[in-house]
Each structure stands twice: as structure tokens, then as C-alpha cells.
Image (cartoon, rainbow, N blue to C red):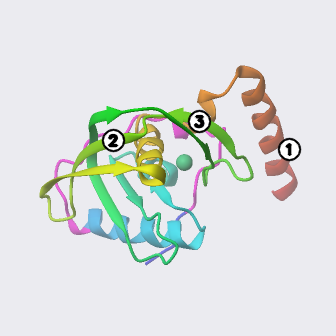
Amino acid sequence: MAILKILQYPDIRLHTIAKPVLEITSATRKLIRDMTETMYAAPGVGLAATQVDVHQQIIVIDVSETHDDLLVFINPEIIMCDGEVKREEGCLSVPGTYEDVTRAERVTVRALDQQGEVFSLNAEGLLATCIQHEIDHLKGKVFVEYLSQLKQSRIRAKLKKHQRETL
Ligand code: NI
């Protein structure tokens, strides 16, 4: 397994739209293992392939505190959503930034598992927020883009400064 490099906002590659996975190969499964290890090491509760510069529709999520409830979604699609809730979000691609985002309170997501079987899952709470956040990544969207232009430019300036200092 390997720890992958996570793209940092405002890297334009984070705006790439991921393509559906057509065939689940051993390379796909290796990528998923590496993404999982990278997410746990960060540590984070979710990671989209987009964030490691692989533009395929794959996300991994584990919102448990014990890191033993891994969910893998290949070609995920939200097929139902309901309600509205505001929750503070962060992102491994936007270190040190936590902001409230309003999203659907409950979602039903349909995806393929690592064996290529279709499954669907009803989610609420942190998991529902996380699923929507990670699916956004696959569409090239970073959560800060829900914020005001002013906040976005402040965050970009802060991160650029931080990136210069750590080079
Ligand atoms: Ni994120």
C-alpha cells in the first residue's frame, strides 16, 4: 500500500470531472487500498479519487471513530435526497479550513462495490454530508465553492501563503 499525495486547493486539477469506472481491475482495487490508507493516515473521513489526481468515479468513506467501517463507492449516484441540514465541513484538500455548508439531510446513494455489484445505501447525519461532499469532488467541486466569493478569496490567499511557506 502507499500513501498518495493529496492535491491542495486551489490546484486546478481539483476541478477535473471524473469519468465512470468501466471495468474494476486489480489496478482499481490497488487504487482503493491506497486511497483508504491515505485517508486513514491523513486522518480524514472521506477521500475522492479526484483528490489524488486520479479522475475516476471512486470514493472511500469511513465516518467511524475506530476506522473499521470502510465504505467504497464506485460510480456513485445520489438517487434520492430529502431535507436540509447545515454542518461544518473540512476537506483534506483545504487544510485548516472549516465552514458551514447546507446540504440534503438524507440521501440514498447507488453505486458499485469492489466486486462490481450494484448496491444502494440510505444515509443521514455525518455520513450523508460526507457522501455529498465526496461526490462533489468527482464533479470537480470543492466545498469552499458553496461559500461567498469573499470567503473563497480569503481561503485561497491563506492557502497560497501557507503553500509558499512550506515549499
Ligand atoms: Ni474534500
Quick one: label 1 or label 3, which is nearer the N terminus? 3
Residue at the far left: name it. 117
- Who is closer to the viewer here, 69 or 73? 69
Residue 141 makes an appearance in the image: no
Amino acid type at image mark 2: Val
Disc 1 from disc 3: Cα separation: 24 Å
Q: Quadrant of residue 42?
A: bottom right
Q: Amino acid at mark 1?
A: Lys
Q: Amino acid at mark 3?
A: Val
Q: Can you say whether 60 is above or below 79 in the image?
A: below
* Residue, disc 2: 107
Q: How far is the residue under mark 2 from the one under mark 3?
A: 16 Å
Location of mark 1 (residue): 161
Is residue 21 one of those drawn in magenta?
yes
Going from N to C along the chain, the mark reached first, 2 or 3, is 3
Q: Which residues make up the magenta segment?
A: 5-26
**Helix, strand, or loop for circle 3?**
strand
Compare marks 1 and 2 and give the one earlier in the sequence: 2
Report the disc number at residue 101.
3
Location of residue 110 in the rendering, given as x and y in whole percent from the top left corner: 22, 46
Q: Residues within 10 Å of mark 3 (few under 14, many from 20)?
A: some
Dominant secondary structure (helix, strand or loop) of the stretch shown in magenta:
loop
Question: In which quadrant is the N terminus drawn?
Answer: bottom left
In-image side of 107 versus 103 (left or right): left
Query: Foreground mark, 1 or 2?
Result: 2
Q: Is residue 55 visible?
A: yes
List x then y, in percent, for residue 127.
43, 54
Q: Report the residue at 19% width, 59% height from top.
A: 24
Q: Position of residue 82 (x, y in %)?
A: 35, 33
Q: CA distance from mark 1 to mark 2?
A: 37 Å
Picture coordinates of residue 146, whole percent (x, y): 59, 28
Q: Residues within 10 Å of mark 2 (few under 14, many from 20)?
A: many
